[in-house]
Amino acid sequence: MDTKYIFVTGGVVSSLGKGIISASIGKLLQARGYKVTIQKFDPYINIDPGTLNPYEHGECYVTEDGMETDLDLGHYERFTGIHTTRHNSITTGRIYKTVIDRERRGDYLGKTIQVVPHITDEIKRRMLRAPLNPSEGRNGFDSPLHLEGSGEAFDFVITEVGGTIGDIESAPFMEAIRQLRWQLGRNAVCVHLTYVPYLKAADELKTKPTQHSVKELQGMGIQPDILVLRTERHLDDSMRLKVASFCNVDLECVVQSEDMPSIYEVPVSMQRQGLDAAILRKIGIPVGETPAMVPWHTFLEKQRNASKEVHIGLVGKYNLQDAYKSIRESLNLAGIYNDVKAKIHFINSEGITPENVAEQLSGMAGIIVCPGFGQRGIEGKIIAAEYTRTHDIPTFGICLGMQMMVIEFARNVLGYKDANSTEMNPDTPHNVIDIMEEQKNITQMGGTMRLGAYDCQLVEGSRAAEAYRPTPSRNGGEKKALPIKGERGEGLLISERHRHRYEFNNKYKAEYEANGMKCVGINPAADLVEIVEIPEKKWYIGAQFHPEYSSTVLHPHPLFMSFVKACLES
Ligand code: GLN
């Protein structure tokens, strides 16, 4: 089968949930047995979101191959379980960088380099996932030739374009879609997501913004095949018919995306309205039977039944839902598979003092000490880690959170009052967290951390190893953990994603272990400490990696599973 391309755009306002709709389409096509990938094109000029403050753009998600990406890739992976790569997250900055680098190399043979066709061609090439192959003809990316061999081995490539129709910066992306639509014919489908507001005073739902948004799209030469209407109230058939007839779209291709109690209900709602079937019909593929999606429904059933609450504190510095998106979702999922609802409370670490910590953490069954960068809010994290350690409250430190647990232990157990990370104090005499050797000479900020998946060997008998150990009875699937016999003896080998420059300083390892904090996960190649735990506590574990990036709906992460379980038992 030729690769088919689905383009997802959005209109009227941002934050409509294009990422969720793209992920849902991916899920539904995957359930039909197709090989799918989902990619995100963001019209900003940063090369990647790695350098963006989370207040600007929410969490930075990291792929296995070490790309810092948009958080929508987290939705794609959680919904489908398909691993994304650096090819799945593209920005205007990357597009321009490729074109400018080629221009400097002389690839364009004296041509004037312009948005059309050079930028749009590079966008098209990436949308098609075609190789950058100079032998194809030096400036021949707008020739039909480059379509050959595109799309790798996928049946469907879903491309979500960030931003809203009408934005100046998204215009080249729209032009690329227009051209591709023409070149690909029936092998391309355009899905447009818009908003139908409810006006309280008039007690009416309004379709005009949708009509305008579609007109804008048509003005760019793109006729949407499918409209997904975001709405807070149910739209009756007459509304849908009105939209269909004003926008030149078939009635069966107008679906609505009502507010749902959970984003994970969205694929099922889309399937019920025949969104995937409409896509297949547009392309000309026999629709066939509707997949039952049994594991997904089993999960939803569990979600609906999980009513008992467990309160978990997120000790961090970004008071924004999206800043710790993957951690929140990982907790939600682990809660559901433990038959409870994880009630997450953001606790601003900047406001935590020794005097108020008891009050700030009161009622929490456990806390997560969040990842992060820089000085702001770290002392509060350290105070929280001390409180939960001394009060034996389950605690899960992630990346910077783990580092803060290590510093706290040095200060209050090992007696090094001035212990710190060299990130916070380069001159600290007790640098229990120190810059990694290979990071020392790096001056560029973007994409230069220790990024992506690395192996970690777990120490036999540790709580971390127990969490990962595959058992047939464990709820909700497994993460790969291979029993190995290496230089460090027997243990489980796992692989987890990273994003950091600093590490546990091995100089102090023996002292930590002698005093009760064990290094129970080690990267075998570099001898880096990846997990620490205090076995005598109920659950006190810090991970240098980010388990939250690999927790999915059908396979919740074992560390989150084990943490939530401990919260319930304590
Ligand atoms: N700032 C720390 C480091 O670079 C932790 C990073 C993080 O939490 N992702 O090592």
Image (cartoon, rainbow, N blue to C red):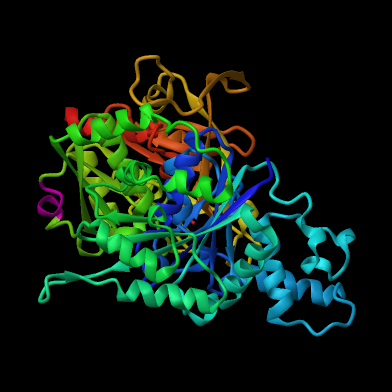
Which quadrant of the structure image shows residue 445?
Answer: bottom right
**Numbered label tally:** 0
Residue range corresponding to the magenta coloring: 357-362
Q: Quadrant of the C terminus?
A: top left
Residue at (28% x, 41% y) in the render = 332
Residue at (24% x, 31% y) in the render = 301
Residue at (70% x, 45% y) in the render = 152
Give the percent coordinates (x, y) of residue 508.
Answer: 47, 41
Residue at (10% x, 76% y) in the render = 201
Q: Nearer the viewer, residue 76 or 415?
A: 76
Question: Looking at the image, can residue 56 be seen?
Answer: no
Task: Look at the magenta stretch and give its main secondary structure.
Answer: helix
Give the percent coordinates (x, y) of residue 530.
Answer: 49, 39
Question: Looking at the image, can residue 480 be seen?
Answer: yes
Q: Is residue 470 above or below residue 37?
A: above
In this picture, residue 448 sits left or right of residue 206: right
Give the percent coordinates (x, y) of residue 289.
Answer: 45, 31
Residue found at the very far top of the displayed protein: 472
Q: Nearer the viewer, residue 272 or 110?
A: 272
Q: Nearer the viewer, residue 556 or 439?
A: 556
Residue found at the very far bottom of the displayed protein: 112
Q: Is residue 307 above or below residue 9?
A: above
> Does the stretch in magenta take in 360?
yes
Q: Quadrant of the N terminus?
A: top right
Q: Nearer the viewer, residue 554 or 221?
A: 221
In this picture, residue 547 sits left or right of residue 333: right
> Does the stretch in magenta take in 59?
no
Give the percent coordinates (x, y) of residue 330.
Answer: 34, 42
